[in-house]
Image (cartoon, rainbow, N blue to C red):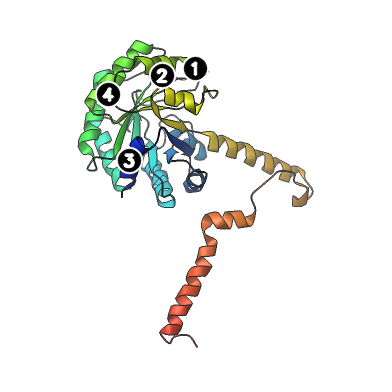
Amino acid sequence: MSKSKILHEMLSSKSIIKVGGAFDAMSAKLVEISGFDAVWAGSFAISATHGLPDASILTMTEFLNVASSMNEACQIPIIADCDTGFGGPSNVSHMVNKYEKAGIAAISIEDKVFPKQNSLLETGKHELLSEKDFAAKIISAKNAKDDPNFMIIARVEALIANLGIDEALKRASAYENAGADAIIIHSKKNTPDEIFEFTEKWNGSVPLVVIPTSYGSVTVDELISHKIKFVIYANHSLRASHLAMSKVLTEIMNSPSLNDVNVDISSMDEIFQLQKMFDIKTQEKEIEEKLKKLGYVD
């Protein structure tokens, strides 16, 4: 079964799909080990690991390479954050072809103009593409996919741009009509109030997705009760990694020995487990046994 099919079937089998953010194969594997349903290959986190702003600087190929490495490391589906789609409708069509062939389960594109800036940047520029032009991107994406289960997720940024609930609803409906398989409704408020106002007025039939980075007090039960089917914890693994690495490196620099460093870190064995290093020994033993049977080993 394809991972797109797995993700699609979760919609009927789960009350809500929990998606953990990652920025490379290791963090994606940790998302999987921790029990999440899917991985979010976030552009903010991936850009940060390249030492670059989340401002449409990395290329499609660079983002695709990271998402592909996540997919190879994990058994759970990967949902790729593809910003504004890396160009116009033709670029989106090419992007869908590449991501689908790489085994990615779903892609998300947002209705901002290129180059976009991170939605939670207070001083950011949040100019939206026209509804018609973004609908054209969705149509192009829908036409380009081969697997009917491959999801095209349209991200509505009207609330981020302070254009109000009515504009957000209007755009979400237009994007569903254009062929979007799910809608991300995004907010930078510190409460979920405008998200819930949106969901209460939403009459569409495709699943709703939220990214509650700024309104962290919201509970999973509250999301479920407001018809939300996906929750994406987009950047917490990146932020936790940044803090932990900063602390341990500072302590190493200021300590006379490693034994004096007072920061918890994973053991070597835990990393070996993640890498499946112990599986190599098992494989080597199996090969040796087969060679013996073939008469190559005394």
Q: Are marks 2 and 1 in contact (CB under 8 Å)?
A: no
- Choose the circle earlier in sequence order: 2 or 3: 3
For residue 271, side relative to residue 54 (left or right): right
Disc 3 is placed on an element classified as helix
Up the image or down, 62 lies above or below 171; here it is: below
- Choose the circle earlier in sequence order: 4 or 2: 2
Q: CA distance from mark 4 to mark 1?
A: 23 Å
- Choose the circle earlier in sequence order: 2 or 1: 2
Q: Which mark is residue 189?
A: 1
x%, y% of residue 77? Answer: 38, 43
The amino acid at mark 2 is His
Residue that mark 3 sits on: 9
Disc 2 versus disc 3: nearer the observer: 3
Residue that mark 2 sits on: 126
The amino acid at mark 4 is Tyr
Disc 2 is placed on an element classified as loop
x%, y% of residue 255? Answer: 77, 45
Q: CA distance from mark 2 to mark 1?
A: 15 Å
Q: Which mark is residue 215?
A: none
Q: Is residue 118 visible?
A: no
Q: Residue at x 37, y 31 (%)?
A: 83
For residue 9, side relative to residue 40 (left or right): left
- Choose the circle earlier in sequence order: 3 or 4: 3
Among the 4 quarters of the image, the one containing residue 131: top left
Disc 3 versus disc 1: nearer the observer: 3
Q: Is residue 280 visible?
A: yes
Q: Residue furthest left?
A: 143
Q: Are marks 2 and 3 in contact (CB under 8 Å)?
A: no
Up the image or down, 85 lies above or below 157; here it is: below
- Choose the circle earlier in sequence order: 3 or 1: 3
Q: Which mark is residue 175?
A: 4
Q: Nearer the viewer, residue 278 or 57?
A: 278
